[in-house]
């Protein structure tokens, strides 16, 4: 739909931010309203207190709605947290004798069979990324999709992502208690990648590292396919806590020191520079050497980046990242973190800022052109592209046109969760007088092929709207 207004809701560990945007005439994202508040109910990317999270959501959404002068009823939500896991998988099927060529239903069947993979209790597959297809033991190149190929067997390597179903429920409860509907959900690394990467980055090979407050999310792309994902339970809050304990100061003071005076490189600061911290009540001010502060930050940041380096090597794509590493998220604002990352990983590193996709006429443009808002802006961009693709598909069906062949990355995720039955967990909270209406299940909805990012939103949208009862 042309110029449709999209709302992105970033539920993070340290902040909850809401972005109201639309496609501008220049093709970029124009943010009409922006609201941010402290996140008080989330730990390591997981909703712990539904009521506190709902209150924070209301504040952020209300602020952005007032600024944009719109009524907000539904939102695109980012999902992350240390409960997100990934694993490789391999599947194979026999092609029925009556199929002279491999058909789309064969590809769908191969992907559907991956749901038989044994998972840990309480986990469900939320997405499957195909890595390559193999026909009669002959691997196909990236440019060739298996539909239309002659073969008796079809195999594929997959990268599977799973999540804890109960944690998905808590996100739903919090959003509903805030009086909103979920339009769709997106893995946060995918949303951030939308905002700070371009097609050339994903094609050449890039590792996007989103350093948030509670977790560090990693997404590795190569040949325009997502090859590896990982969530580390260490991020900006760990650095702040180290400063608080090491300098024996309050958390807010530690955060302020980290942002204003901190550096990731000890050798980059002066030996004699001192920071005076106001004392409490009648206490004398405390003096902290900048070099001491840098040493604390360096130790924890080095630990995080060494784990990032390990994950990149574990993926097997450490030698294929022509576009290097892109750091984004609030943690990317640390001084000299780019240089430390390059030093530890021996890979070119840059800071990913979502300004190239932002219309200069956006509200608070200077503030929003910051790594910490990559996920939120990416959610709006994702929602806009989803809406436009849905509109194009509807127009194509109306004129009986057949869509062109999609890439390997696009085709692999068609209705992969159609047969999954998610049992509802009982809601431990007391009943409330009114709950927002959840759209009813859409019967006989025709399957549509979409991009690999789009399929994430489609499946999780199905989970929230259809698979989990209140």
Image: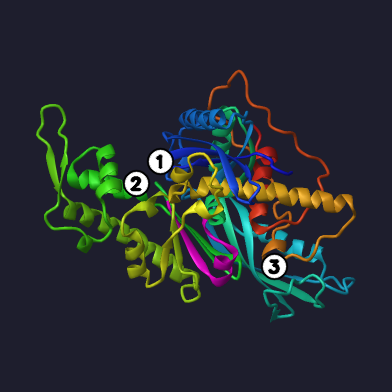
The boundaries of the magenta stretch are 196-211
The residue tagged 1 is 14
Identify the element where label 3 is drawn.
helix
Q: Nearer the viewer, residue 53 or 467?
A: 53
Q: Earlier in the sequence, mark 3 or mark 1?
A: 1
Q: Position of residue 202 (x, y in %)?
A: 57, 66
The residue tagged 2 is 237
Q: Position of residue 308 (x, y in %)?
A: 40, 63
Q: Nearer the viewer, residue 90 or 213?
A: 213
Q: Position of residue 389 (x, y in %)?
A: 73, 52
Quadrant containing the C terminus in the rendered view: top right
Identify the element where label 1 is drawn.
loop
Q: Residues within 10 Å of mark 3 (few under 14, many from 20)?
A: many
Q: Is 298 placed left or right of 341 in the picture? A: left
Whole-number angstrom distance, CA of label 3 to CA of label 2: 38 Å
Residue located at (42% from left, 63% from top): 350
The residue tagged 3 is 408
Determine which quarter of the picture holds residue 303: bottom left
Inspect this view and state whether residue 422 appears: no
Q: Residues within 10 Å of mark 2 (few under 14, many from 20)?
A: some
């Amino acid at each position: 739909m042309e110029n449709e207004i999209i709302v992105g809701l970033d539920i993070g560990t340290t902040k909850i931010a809401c972005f109201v945007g639309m496609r501008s005439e220049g093709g970029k994202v124009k943010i009409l309203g922006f609201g941010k508040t402290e996140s008080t109910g989330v730990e390591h990317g997981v909703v712990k207190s539904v009521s506190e999270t709902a209150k924070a959501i209301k504040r952020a959404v209300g602020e952005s709605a007032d600024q944009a002068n719109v009524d907000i009823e539904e939102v695109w939500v980012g999902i992350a947290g240390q409960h997100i896991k990934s694993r490789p998988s391999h599947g194979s099927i026999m092609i029925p004798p009556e199929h002279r060529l491999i058909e789309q239903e064969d590809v769908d069947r191969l992907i559907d069979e991956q749901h038989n993979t044994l998972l840990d209790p309480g986990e469900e597959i939320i997405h499957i990324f195909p890595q390559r297809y193999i026909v009669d033991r002959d691997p196909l190149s990236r440019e060739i999709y298996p539909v239309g190929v002659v073969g008796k067997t079809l195999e594929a390597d997959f990268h599977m992502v799973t999540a804890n179903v109960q944690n998905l429920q808590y996100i739903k409860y919090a959003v509903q208690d805030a009086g909103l509907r979920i339009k769709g959900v997106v893995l946060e690394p995918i949303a951030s990648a939308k905002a700070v990467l371009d097609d050339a980055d994903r094609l050449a090979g890039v590792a996007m590292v989103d350093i948030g407050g509670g977790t560090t999310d990693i997404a590795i792309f190569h040949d325009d396919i997502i090859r590896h994902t990982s969530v580390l339970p260490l991020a900006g809050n760990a650095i702040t806590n180290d400063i608080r304990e090491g300098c024996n100061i309050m958390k807010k003071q530690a955060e302020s020191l980290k942002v204003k005076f901190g550096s990731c490189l000890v050798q980059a600061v002066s030996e004699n520079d001192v920071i005076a911290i106001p004392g409490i009540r009648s206490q004398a001010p405390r003096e902290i050497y900048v070099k001491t502060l840098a040493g604390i930050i360096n130790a924890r940041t080095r630990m995080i980046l060494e784990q990032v380096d390990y994950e990149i090597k574990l993926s097997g794509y450490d030698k294929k990242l022509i576009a290097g590493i892109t750091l984004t998220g609030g943690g990317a604002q640390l001084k000299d973190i780019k240089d430390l990352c390059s030093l530890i990983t021996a890979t070119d590193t840059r800071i990913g800022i979502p300004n190239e996709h932002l219309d200069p006429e956006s509200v608070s443009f200077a503030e929003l052109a910051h790594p910490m808002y990559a996920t939120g802006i990416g959610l709006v961009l994702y929602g806009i592209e989803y809406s436009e693709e849905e509109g194009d598909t509807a127009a194509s069906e109306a004129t009986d046109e057949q869509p062109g062949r999609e890439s390997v990355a696009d085709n692999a995720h068609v209705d992969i969760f159609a047969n999954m039955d998610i049992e509802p967990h009982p809601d431990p909270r007391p009943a409330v007088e009114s709950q927002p209406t959840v759209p009813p299940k859409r019967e006989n909805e025709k399957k549509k092929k979409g991009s690999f990012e789009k399929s994430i939103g489609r499946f999780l949208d199905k989970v929230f709207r259809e698979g989990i009862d209140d």
